[in-house]
């Protein structure tokens, strides 16, 4: 794709092209873009993002939990094996998570394991808004959440991730 699309260009896309372009806004969950397409025409970038968020909010709980689970552990096995989506790899690199010391990798491993044990979910945070230090601090703080609070926190962060990804593709 050449530069960013205008909202007018977005509104002219057929469902297949729209889903192809925006299916990666939400980690391995193109169903969200497919459903958001039905809300066209979008007045602007805010309205477009709101349509995506409404699809998530309107989904059954098991689908929202599946969306959270589609996210990789930060600096986890998928990152080490090179199995992240292009977007996740770039985002993790932006926070320096691709350049951790052995001690930092171990700390992430412990935090990821604690999260999965406590919530049966990965720790999800919009890494583009953070440094590795604030990511560590946030993970430790969020471990005191209830599962319900953590699902809400993860979905909020996913909304933030998707917004930044959308801003990379569409003129604001």
Image (tube, grey):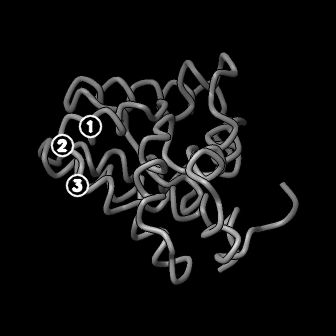
The N terminus is located in which quarter?
A: bottom right
Q: Is residue 53 above or below residue 122?
A: below
Q: Based on the displayed image, in which of its 4 quarters is residue 102 positioned?
A: top right
Residue position marked by numbered label 2 in the rendering: 60
Residue extending furthest toward the right? 2
Mark found first going from the N terminus, 3 or 1 = 3
Q: Is residue 10 above or below residue 119?
A: below
Q: Position of residue 79 (x, y in %)?
A: 62, 26
Residue pictured at 13% horizontal, 47% vertical: 148
* Crowding at mark 2 (Cα within 10 Å: few <14, some 14-19, many 20+): few
Left or right position of 156 against 27: left
Residue position marked by numbered label 1 in the rendering: 63
Q: Are marks 1 and 2 in contact (CB under 8 Å)?
A: yes
Left or right position of 117 against 31: left
Left or right position of 159 against 54: right
Secondary structure beneath dot 3 equals helix
* Crowding at mark 1 (Cα within 10 Å: few <14, some 14-19, many 20+): some
Q: Position of residue 110 (x, y in %)?
A: 39, 25
Residue position marked by numbered label 3 in the rendering: 58
Left or right position of 36 against 4: left
Residue pictured at 84% horizontal, 65% vertical: 3
Q: Is residue 51 above or below residue 154?
A: below
């Amino acid at each position: 794709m050449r530069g960013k699309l205008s909202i007018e260009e977005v509104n002219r896309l057929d469902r297949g092209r729209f889903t192809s372009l925006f299916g990666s806004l939400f980690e391995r969950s193109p169903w969200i873009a497919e459903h958001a397409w039905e809300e066209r025409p979008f007045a602007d970038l805010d309205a477009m993002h709101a349509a995506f968020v409404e699809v998530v909010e309107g989904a059954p709980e098991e689908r929202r939990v599946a969306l959270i689970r589609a996210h990789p552990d930060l600096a986890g096995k998928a990152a080490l094996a090179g199995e992240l989506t292009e977007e996740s790899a770039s985002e993790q690199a932006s926070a320096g998570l691709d350049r951790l010391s052995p001690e930092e990798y171990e700390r992430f491993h412990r935090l990821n394991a604690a999260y999965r044990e406590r919530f049966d979910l990965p720790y999800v945070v919009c890494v583009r808004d953070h440094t590795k230090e604030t990511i560590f601090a946030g993970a430790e703080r969020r471990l005191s959440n209830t599962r319900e609070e953590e699902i809400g926190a993860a979905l909020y962060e996913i909304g933030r991730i998707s917004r930044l990804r959308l801003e990379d593709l569409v003129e604001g």
